[in-house]
Image (spheres, rainbow, N blue to C red):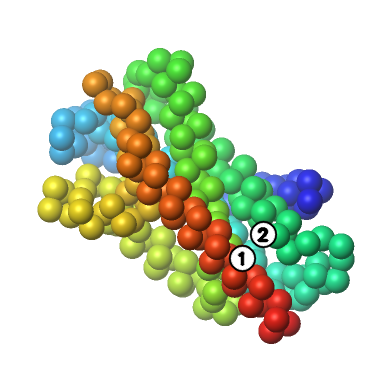
Amino acid sequence: MTTLIKLEILRTLRNKRYVLFTVLYPALLYVFFISAYNGGTVAGGVSAKSYFMVSMATFGAVGAVLTGSAQRISLERKSGWVRQLRLTALPGRAYTVAKIAACAVTTLPAILVVFAIGAIEGVSLGAGQWLGLGLALWLGSFVFAALGVALGYAAQPDAVQPIVMIVYMLMALFGGTWFPVGDSLKKFAQFNPVYLYNQLATFVRPGQSLDLAAVAGLGGFLVVFVGAAAYLYRKDTRQA
């Protein structure tokens, strides 16, 4: 399984589309947003540079794992690669775990590049806060890696790309990626994993601590998505 994880990571990092859309694109959007706000604040008095540093890091991380895993799995199903793997000694759960783990590792460049630009632009955090924030966002990306695997098996290969993009953009739109979620929508946002993902960063604000409700919510989504991925994998196996 370790060999498969390494192979998946190398395949992703060699993909030019991955570098463009999940690393460079969020970084460029971050520069655009902080320029538009001209160093000001967003709703709630939070610095625009800090707010969009987090939201663009999560945007890139979700894009890296969600689109990468779902589309790659759909292509592997179409080409027959998944069927070939089933003929080997590799158990089905190992394939699923390898996909999730490999995708989660590839989120690091998307997060770190935006963090680097944020630091250059003047976002000031302590060493422990930088490390804690990076770790929180990286661990949170496992939730979306599992969702990507589930979508890769749920959708037909020809339809997976538009389905993933619709799911991705809707979650981002109502999850605080482009603008803070208003008080009237927060009760609905609690059911959006992207909103909970963005909430992981609130502990770096003065007087705030880690949002344990967001952690619990993401934990619940992780269980659901992993369960769905395992079920859909077994279903696909029976149909193969």
Three-letter amino acid code of the residue under disc 2 = Thr
Percent x, y of residue 26: 43, 45
- How dense is the environment of label 2, judged by Cα within 10 Å: few (below 14), some, or many (20 and up)? some
Question: Does 115 appear above or below 141?
Answer: above
Percent x, y of residue 116: 47, 27
* Residue at 44% over, 55% down: 221
Question: Does 133 appear above or below 71?
Answer: above
* Residue at 37% over, 19% down: 125
Residue 7 in sight from this viewpoint: no
Residue 89 in sight from this viewpoint: yes
Three-letter amino acid code of the residue under disc 1 = Ala
| Residue contact at pointers 1 and 2, CB within 8 angstroms | yes
First in residue order: circle 1 vs circle 2: 2
Question: Which disc, if any, is residue 96?
Answer: 2
Residue 119 as seen in the image, left or right of residue 92: left
Mark 1 residue element? helix
Distance Cα–Cα, label 1 vs label 2: 7 Å
